[in-house]
Image (cartoon, rainbow, N blue to C red):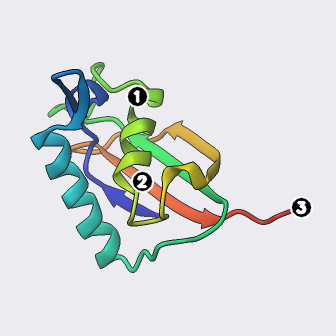
Amino acid sequence: MILLPYPVANNRYYRHFRGMTILSKEGAAYKKEAAWKCKAAGMKILYGDVELYVILHPRMNKNGSCSKVRLDLDGCLKVACDSLNGIGYEDDKQITRIVAEVGEQMIDGGLSIQVRNLEKM
């Protein structure tokens, strides 16, 4: 598992400009940091069908309690899938299984990710 920073909200990851949807500056910065962390952890591009395992870690309040404000699990999946394009797999069309859950809180929050080749049955 690789721990990435707490993801950007999906509506801030992209911007709409002249009828097109483009990656925002904030989205590009998140993708760049995700790429750096994944490559530093030894992640290689996988080919064929892949499985993505994601754990969203909510932010922790200063008193140690879990923040009531957190991203929707399905919203962070889009950001996670798009951020790993060209890093963990060639294209997110390769993802044929996703396992996602909300995990334990962390001081700044985070997103744990694992990408694996999917075994053919």
Q: Which residue is mark 3?
A: 121
Q: Amino acid at mark 3?
A: Met
Left or right of 40 in this view: 113: right
Residue that appears at 39% across and 57% down: 84
The answer to whether marks 3 and 2 mark residues whose Cβ atoms lie closer than 8 Å is no
What residue did someone put label 1 on? 75
Nearest the eye: 19 or 16: 19
Q: Which of the 4 quarters of the picture holds residue 41?
A: bottom left
Q: Residues within 10 Å of mark 1 (few under 14, many from 20)?
A: some
Residues 68 and 94: in front is 94
Callout 3: helix, strand or loop?
loop
- Residue found at the far right of this picture: 121
Q: Quadrant of residue 17 in the image?
A: top left
Q: Which mark is residue 112?
A: 2
Mark sitting earlier along the chain (2/1): 1
Distance in Å between CA atoms under marks 3 and 1: 30 Å
Image coords of residue 32 (percent x, y): 20, 59
> Label 1 is placed on what type of residue?
Gly
Residue 73 in the image: state x and y as whole percent. 45, 30
Question: Which of the marked residues, 3 or 1, is nearer the chain's N terminus?
Answer: 1
- Calculate the distance from the C-alpha at mark 3 to the C-alpha at mark 2: 27 Å
Indicate the secondary structure of the residue bearing disc 1.
helix
Considering depth in this image, is 117 or 53 the residue closer to the camera?
Answer: 117
Residue found at x 77% / y 66%: 119
Q: Secondary structure at mark 2?
A: strand
Image quadrant occupied by the C terminus: bottom right
- Separation of residues labelled 2 and 1 (CA atoms): 15 Å
Q: Earlier in the sequence, mark 3 or mark 2?
A: 2
Identified by mark 2, the residue type is Ser
Which residue is at 39% across, 80% downward?
Answer: 42
